[in-house]
Image (cartoon, rainbow, N blue to C red):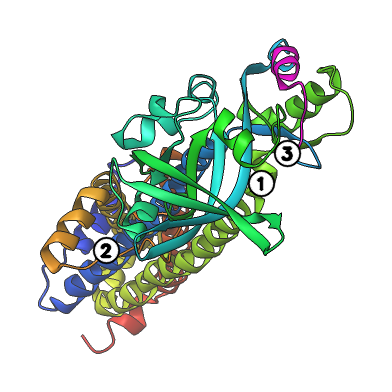
Amino acid sequence: MINRYEYWIGRRYVKSRSRNGFISLISAISMLGIAIAVAVLIVVLSVVNGFERELKDRLLAMSGHATIESPDNGLGDWEAWVGSVEQQPDVAAAAPFVSGQGLLVYGHQLSGAEFRGIDPALESRVSGVGDKIVEGDLATLVAGSFNIVLGLELANKLQATIGDRITLTLAQGIVTPAGIIPRMRRFTVTGIYRVGMYEFDRRLAFINLTDAQKLFRLQDNVSGIRLAVTDIFDAPKIVRRAAIEGGGIGQVLVSDWTRMNVNFFRSIQITKSILFVILLMVVAVAAFNIVSTLVMVVRDKQADIAILRTVGAKPADILRIFVTQGVVIGVIGTMAGAFLGVTLSLNLEGIVQFMEATLGIKFLAADVYFISDLPSDLRIKDVLQISAIALVLAFFSTLYPAWRGARTLPAEALRYE
């Protein structure tokens, strides 16, 4: 089929060697337009996918898959809770935590922060905090030592480093005859972590679980327990079942990573859909350039069409000639765009780092965006979907000019030759 003369002529018309080289230029511009549009769409969707992946991984590393909490910040007998919850088949591990807020002061610097009391040995089973330490060690959070691990941005704000002693002030004060005196405690910085999300790096600090219980006067109670489950997408069902079958007494609040961060992921999905539609219009505009290209080719090849018709070519043969030319333009442009988009997506982080170092600018400011790096997650499904849509648009763009060429009458075309 591909050896039929109309397909051969259609491919020859792509690189026209006639006196009108302008047609070849328009064909090249059409290919370039499709290639750029396809590449841009692939890169943009890869960046959005990268944001979604990094956001999910970093949120899960810091907040866990699911939580069971007490409404009054006092979950008692947490050892029994952890033991019973871990017996559930879909729960990989569980760890207690204490949460609270206060003010950190070091020298003339101060900053509000959220504090999370943890047991380092148990916490490492449900979150990836230990893997995010850039200085010091999470294991230094020993009971009674009153050590603290800060986020990198928080440490920079306080201008504190390893070994510095900072003061923690709580809003809950001590009532004295002279009035209410804030409760204060000095902590030693023994670790600094960086997760790459400003919300965590700037506002969250870790202390030992026992120290947090003493600090917030919870006795042996905890704020809740954090769970790691075997299937993160089934976390809502697993945490509810674990809370019901865990054997705990009293009411508890259950939550999971999909509910705690639902607005983040919903906004990403909406943004991805909107960007896909908008950039798909760019692909459509580039594909419809084929219409103008083929219309000019049809006008330029009037004499060729007339000669082919006089030697026995049918209108369907003329139609296939110009459809072939448009499809070749679309296929070459789509393949070039897919190759360019895949190459850029796979090397995007290195390219951005090079540009930031060369130009001395930061594309994603940490205090504005949730993630300070520009991630990329190339998915073959997106590449195939974009390429297929571009090819379909290119094909439909050829139909009208090809139909016009097939309706050309030999007598009228050769009248002025």
Label 2 sits on what residue type? Met
Q: Residues within 10 Å of mark 2 (few under 14, many from 20)?
A: many
The residue nearer to you, when weighing 190 against 12, is: 190
- Image quarter of residue 300: bottom left
**Residue occupied by mark 3:** 255
Dot 1 or dot 3, earlier in sequence: 3
Answer above or below: position of 203 versus 29.
Answer: above
Residue 176 in view here: yes
Instruction: State yes or no: residue 291 in magenta.
Output: no
Q: Which circle marks residue 260 in the picture?
A: 1
Cβ atoms at labels 1 and 3 below 8 Å apart? yes
**Residue occupied by mark 2:** 31
Residue at horizontal 55%, vertical 45%? 115
Disc 1 or disc 2, which is closer to the eye? 1
Secondary structure character of the magenta stretch overall: helix
Q: What span is colored magenta in the figure?
A: 74-84
Dot 2 or dot 3, earlier in sequence: 2
Answer above or below: position of 158 versus 164.
Answer: below
Quadrant housing the C terminus: bottom left
Dot 1 or dot 2, earlier in sequence: 2
Secondary structure found at label 2 = helix
Q: CA distance from mark 1 to mark 3?
A: 7 Å
Secondary structure found at label 1 = helix
Q: CA distance from mark 2 to mark 3?
A: 51 Å
Q: From this viewpoint, which residue is outermost toward the bottom?
A: 416
The residue nearer to you, when weighing 350 against 250, is: 250
User: From the viewer's perspective, is 356 left or right of 83?
Assistant: left
Cβ atoms at labels 1 and 2 below 8 Å apart? no
**Residue 44 drawn at (x, y percent):** 39, 58
- Image quarter of residue 299: bottom left
